[in-house]
Amino acid sequence: MEPPELLEQLKENLYVSVAVSTTLVLVTAWVLFSTVPSHILWAWAGIQIILAVGRIVVVRKLIANNTNRQQFRTVKMYYTAIMLFIGLSWGAAAILASLYSSEVTLITLALILAGLTAGSVSTMTPVFSGFAAFFFGATLPLFVAMFISPYDDLVSMSPIVMLYTVIVFSSGHKLYSSIFDALELTHELQRLNEVVVKEKNYAEQANRAKSTFLSSMSHEVRTPLNAILGFSQLLKMDDLNPQQSQNLEEIHIAGEHLLSLINEVLDLSKVESGDVDLNLQPVFIHESMQRCISMMKPLADKQQITLTKFDAEENWCIQADVKRVQQVFLNLLSNAIKYNKQAGEVTIFCEQVNDTFLRISIKDTGFGIAKEKQDDVFSPFQRLGWEAGSVEGSGIGLFFTKKLINLMGGNVGFESKQGVGSTFWCELPLVDATTDIFTVENTINN
């Protein structure tokens, strides 16, 4: 069965094609009226009208949706037969012109048939068997009419008719093939798109299930872990020997680290499930960053890392959630310190971007990130080769940072060169500190 799109094209072209053919029947009758016997001419015109009506009826049945494959083949056979008779009736007109009319009249009819058959390439090719039947039914008798003509000039032109037949038919076949191939490709793309959408839905469901599981697991694990940490604090108050105190301290440190990892997983599950409440409001960047630097200074001093003075205008204000933006800054600063070289340096600086965003950059003099690993920087649970290293972490910090920045209407990125260091930056909307919060929220949403 032909694709429904091809049948729809046949239907769209049907009435225009029939109207043009009927007009040409009247023109042909007028051209042959003075030479061909009237009763033969009227019989020919009547047959054309009857065949045109039959063509409309069969095409309507052909495009009906309630036919099965066998019924469609039967109707298609009728359609092909009718188109063959229509083509032969036009060819008969050429034979009549050859028998009764002058050289000029036959040339005129040849031009009419040339235009009619050329036009059929665009109007009849959707059902190619019908096009082929009509085309050869009209052109082959024309070739015969010119070949048997008593005029030498027309006989010598008959090979041109055959050449025209080959060229136009070839064009019609190529057009049908290209349309058919394009429709098959479209159907395949639609099928693949449906598969992609279905797989995307499955992935989203699995992701939600994973986030729900992580959230539930994190809550369940934190309860006994908090009990372990609490009892370890109580045991520290007892009279213990130095070895016991050291062992207890190791237990407490390991428990604190495990609790921090669980909290990170819980935060990740909240972000992925969309269960994060943000209180967007104007935040003074200088004050917020200085607070984060103060919290990170003990870690930096432990590794002899120099934190340069944060140079930012005190009136610079960003649109953000205070708690979450500090969480982002702490994560970026922590990474810059942890993955730095001994006695290295961390530089924090700000700059305006297009007068609408403020970019906060944190530059380190660490080991940098290999070029082949940079595409995975913001992927969850990716530690980029540090899994077996001395630096602890879960590999979700930067993924979490990117999610939070995007939720606050900002952007995040980085530049890194292996052996030289990295610069991570985030951009957040720059606002006026006196701007009303609701005005700010509407601005960022738009």
Image (tube, rainbow, N blue to C red):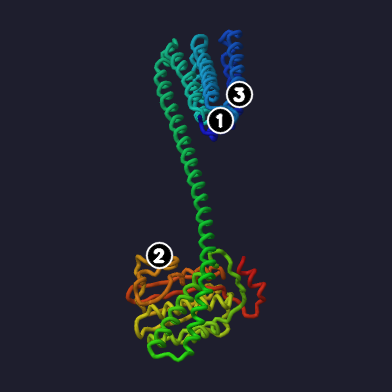
Q: Residue 297 versus residue 149: which sits nearer the camera?
A: 297
Q: Secondary structure at mark 1?
A: helix
Q: Which residue corresponds to the image point at 61% horizontal and 18% vertical from the top-left?
A: 49
Residue 161 point in image, percent of width and height: 43, 21
Comes first in the chain, label 1 or label 2: 1
Quadrant location of the C terminus? bottom right
Q: Position of residue 386 (x, y in %)?
A: 36, 72
On the image, numbered disc 3 is attached to which residue? Answer: 56
Q: In the rendered view, would you say 35 is above or below 228?
A: above
- Depth check, mark 1 against mark 2: the one in front is 2
Seen from the viewer's position, the closer of residues 137 and 424 is: 424
- How crowded pointer 1 is (Cα within 10 Å; few <14, some 14-19, many 20+) is rated as many
Indicate which disc residue 41 carries: none
On the rendered structure, is 373 left or right of 268?
Answer: left
Q: Quadrant of residue 356?
A: bottom right
Residue 281 visible in rendering: yes
Residue flagged by tag 2: what amino acid is it? Asp
Q: Is residue 23 visible?
A: no
Q: Residue 149 location, x and y as percent?
A: 44, 11
Disc 3 on helix, strand or loop? helix
> Which residue, given by chain and number where applicable, does mark 2 sit on?
375
Residue type for callout 3: Ile
Q: Is residue 144 above or below residue 56?
A: above
For residue 211, above or below residue 4: below
Which residue is labeled 1 in the image? 10
Q: CA distance from mark 3 to mark 1?
A: 11 Å
